[in-house]
Amino acid sequence: MSTLTDLQSIRRIALYYKEQVVPPFKVGVVGVYHYADLAKIVHDLPGNQTLEVWDSWWAIPSLEDSIKIIEWDLVDQLAWKSEVRDCDKFAFWFRGMTAMKFKVNHVAVVRDDVSHHAYCLIWLPDHGVPLLFEPQTDLYWLATDPDPNPGMHDFSTAKILT
């Protein structure tokens, strides 16, 4: 292989990995929520969820940008490993990654003590019903819709850490 071919090959590999580290798109903020906004949204959801607040305001991107983030993130490609790469680590990874890479904090971690599981909640603009998101599979659905994997998620009494 020639030196030029080697350099081109290395460049292709570097560009591939750069796209995995540096997002190839920007995310815009279309709204900012405060505690009262989140409390109202949670109050209007079916069930009896509790809200544990860590931030004082939340930068909310569009639904389209949220879906782009889900599709770009590769955490769902990692193999599950008990107590090392399990549900809570996947959920906290996705929450932290969105804040660090996209400068938005619209992802909460859901602690579901009924099904002994952790996943994410994604706040949406216009005070809409939030999405529930399973970072291990990239599956998402509205918080008011039935669980697409019955028994895996019981959002009715979940703790929302945001």
Image (spheres, rainbow, N blue to C red):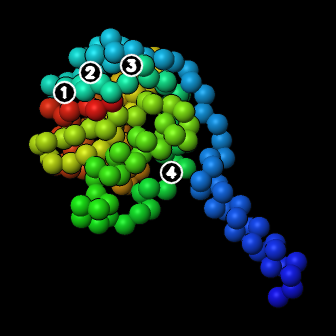
Q: Quadrant of residue 159?
A: top left
Cα–Cα span, label 3 and label 1: 19 Å
The type of residue carrying mark 2 is Val
Nearer-N-terminus badge (4/3): 3
Nearer-N-terminus badge (4/1): 1
Residue bearing the label numbered 1: 49
Residue 148 visible, this orientation:
no
Name the residue rendered at 75%, 72% in the picture. Answer: 10
Disc 4 element: loop
Residue bearing the label numbered 4: 73
Name the residue rendered at 33%, 27% in the picture. Answer: 54
Nearer-N-terminus badge (3/2): 2
Cα–Cα span, label 3 and label 2: 16 Å
Q: Is residue 142 above or below residue 24?
A: above
Residue bearing the label numbered 2: 42
Circle nearer the viewer, 4 or 3: 3
Circle nearer the viewer, 3 or 1: 3
Q: Quadrant of residue 111?
A: top left
Whether pointer 1 and pointer 2 mark residues with C-beta atoms closer than 8 Å, the reply is yes
The type of residue carrying mark 4 is Asp
Residue bearing the label numbered 3: 56
Nearer-N-terminus badge (1/2): 2
The type of residue carrying mark 3 is Ser
Whether pointer 4 and pointer 3 mark residues with C-beta atoms closer than 8 Å, the reply is no
Cα–Cα span, label 2 and label 4: 26 Å
Disc 3 element: loop
